[in-house]
Image (cartoon, rainbow, N blue to C red):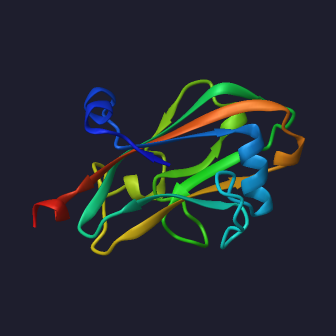
Amino acid sequence: MARLTVNEAGTSGYTHVISLSFDDLAKIKLGTDPFNGETLSTAGQLPIASIPAGGAVELAGVFESTALAGATDITLDVGTTGGDPDEFIDNLDVDGMSAPVFNSGDGFTGNQSQAVPYQAATTILAEVNGTTASLTAGNIVIALRIIDLGSFA
């Protein structure tokens, strides 16, 4: 995941953005980091960003920039819990999207509708599910706005 420069963040409203092709999604599902070829700690879950201690995720969005083709069961979770990382985006039917999706995860419901806070530094995971090996085209973009209150300490 790319951390945006000050100028990019200022114009886009996001601090971190990652773009994943259909081939990247298949590699993640099989347990390989598509960017460095290393084996993932958990197959299907790619670490994409870090929340600093005292930080929060204020905005999470997913955009299917090029329609996925070849499979109709691709889902995506984005969050911090290793077993079910769905605090920011939960069980998103990516190939069925008709518009970008924002803040659909468990952390953005109830009392935390504006930001999901973290006391300790925490890794954000993107979890890919479905028959990714059947994909023949497509690209998704995941964007996050992470607040770093610790930078003021």
Task: Residue at the far left: name it.
Answer: 153
Q: Nearer the viewer, residue 23 or 65?
A: 23
Q: Nearer the viewer, residue 132 or 38?
A: 38
- For the C terminus, the image quarter is bottom left
Residue 91 percent coordinates (x, y): 62, 51
Whether residue 73 sits left or right of residue 87 in the image: it is: right
Q: Residue at x 52, y 70 (%)?
A: 81
Count of marks overlaid on the render: 0
Q: Nearer the viewer, residue 38 or 68?
A: 38
Residue 35 lies, with reference to residue 5, above or below; the image says below
Residue at 64% in and 49% down: 76
Q: Quadrant of residue 59?
A: top left
Query: Horizontal placement of 121 versus 143: left or right?
Result: left
Q: State which quadrant residue 112 falls in.
A: bottom left
Image side of residue 137 versus residue 49, left or right: right
Quarter occupied by residue 23: top right
Q: Residue furthest front?
A: 36
User: Residue 71's x, y, as percent?
Assistant: 85, 38
- Image coordinates of residue 53 in percent, x first then y, are 27, 70
Q: Residue at the spot x=41%, y=58% of the render?
A: 107
Q: Is residue 2 above or below residue 33?
A: above
Q: Is residue 18 depicted above or below 123 in this figure?
A: above
Task: Tell me which residue sits at (62%, 35%) in the image.
Answer: 140
Q: Position of residue 52 (x, y in %)?
A: 31, 65
